[in-house]
Amino acid sequence: MPELPEVETTKRGIEPWLKGATIEQVVVRQPQLRWPVVNEIQQLQGQVIQGLQRRAKYILVATDAGTAIWHLGMSGSLRLVEPNEDTRLHDHIDWQLSNGKILRYHDPRRFGALLWLPAGQAWQDSEYLAHLGPEPLSDAFDGDYLYQRSRGKKQAVKTFVMDGKVVVGAGNIYANEALFLAGIRPTTAAGRISRVRYQRLAEHIKQVLAAAIEQGGTTLRDFVGGDGQPGYFAQQLYVYGRGGKPCRQCSQTLTEIRLGQRSTVYCQSCQR
DNA sequence: ATAATCACCTGCTCGC
DNA sequence: TGCGAGCAGGTGATTA
């Protein structure tokens, strides 16, 4: 489920129930995730949650003892459940909260993670976060930045913008969409795209992510009781998942290829 | 250094 | 109906 808009929506959805609550118990049923859940994670017990932050697709939970860092991987989800709700297959971690709720982590593919950063180390310096590129919705990210970073690169522009060291949050769906909206063919070498075209691309990356975050707020607002499964606003996608179907702008059949092992869809007429 | 590929893991869909 | 192949929203490690 999680691209950046889904992670942001998750963060916003759970924050009201987490902030100010005490973590009474941490239950780890399956520690073998992307990285093993360390025993030190138990230091969360008894801690008051000071607040939540998102950096890239990571959700940071701050306490006086340290910071817990969630990553949802490809199939992870976090939601609040009532204490009497039975656990299901792949419900790997629970946080029992002082307000009676349980924060429950579910992740069939186990590509996600729960990391522990002891107090005293700034999370920006964490080995998992230090190398990350700018946030796409920040002022640090714009067309000039993409232009400068891409000079001399022969890599396809799509894999370039999906590289978290360049910019975070441009996952496969939104990279496909932003490239369509910017009229740029995903296979074009990153180093051969003009400044002006990168300015358009950066704007569309911002726009498509912001719009999805806005929708996420309405589509999966209910993190208590609901099943927490978001949609991808499929009705609004121009290219992702639409290979072989007609372009919504010009009706030409959309082309689907694989780029860096990821499904890539574009319009040969609208994207040059 | 750069760019492409592999690997982690389960579940679902598709074609035979 | 069953079964293998291929694919899925991420990203660090490994290979050319």
Image (cartoon, coloured by chain):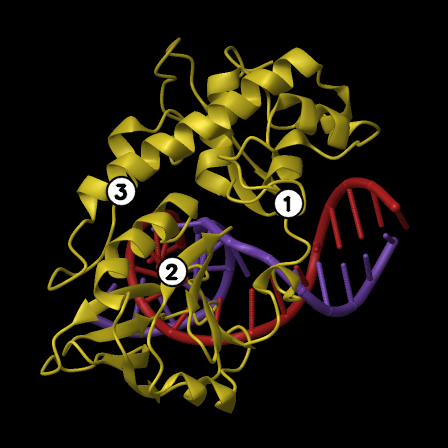
Chain colours: A yellow, B red, C purple
In-image side of A128 versus C2 (left or right): right
Please, what secondary structure does the residue beneath circle 1 have?
loop
Q: CA distance from mark 2 to mark 3?
A: 18 Å
Q: Quick check: marks 1 and 2 in contact, CB under 8 Å?
A: no
Q: Quick check: marks 1 and 3 in contact, CB under 8 Å?
A: no
Residue type (three-letter) at the residue carrying disc 2: Leu
Q: Nearer the viewer, residue A178 or A195?
A: A195
Q: Residues within 10 Å of mark 3 (few under 14, many from 20)?
A: many
2 or 3: mark nearer the eye: 2
Q: CA distance from mark 1 to mark 2?
A: 20 Å
Q: Residue at x 36, y 62 (%)?
A: A51
Q: Which residue is mark 3?
A: A216
On residue A52, the disc is: 2
Vertical comparison of A231 with A141: above or below:
below
Vertical comparison of A169 with A148: above or below:
below
The earlier-in-sequence mark between 2 and 3 is 2
Residue type (three-letter) at the residue carrying disc 3: Gly
Residue type (three-letter) at the residue carrying disc 1: Gly
Please, what secondary structure does the residue beneath circle 3 have?
helix
Q: Nearer the viewer, residue A264 or A5?
A: A5
Tell me which corner region of the image, top left, top right, bottom left or bottom right, holds residue A21. Answer: bottom left
Q: Are marks 2 and 3 on the same chain?
A: yes
Q: CA distance from mark 1 to mark 3?
A: 24 Å
Q: Residue at x 50, y 12 (%)?
A: A270
Q: Nearer the viewer, residue A148 or A239?
A: A148
Write down the chain letter for disc 3.
Answer: A
Please, what secondary structure does the residue beneath circle 2 have?
strand
On residue A133, the disc is: 1
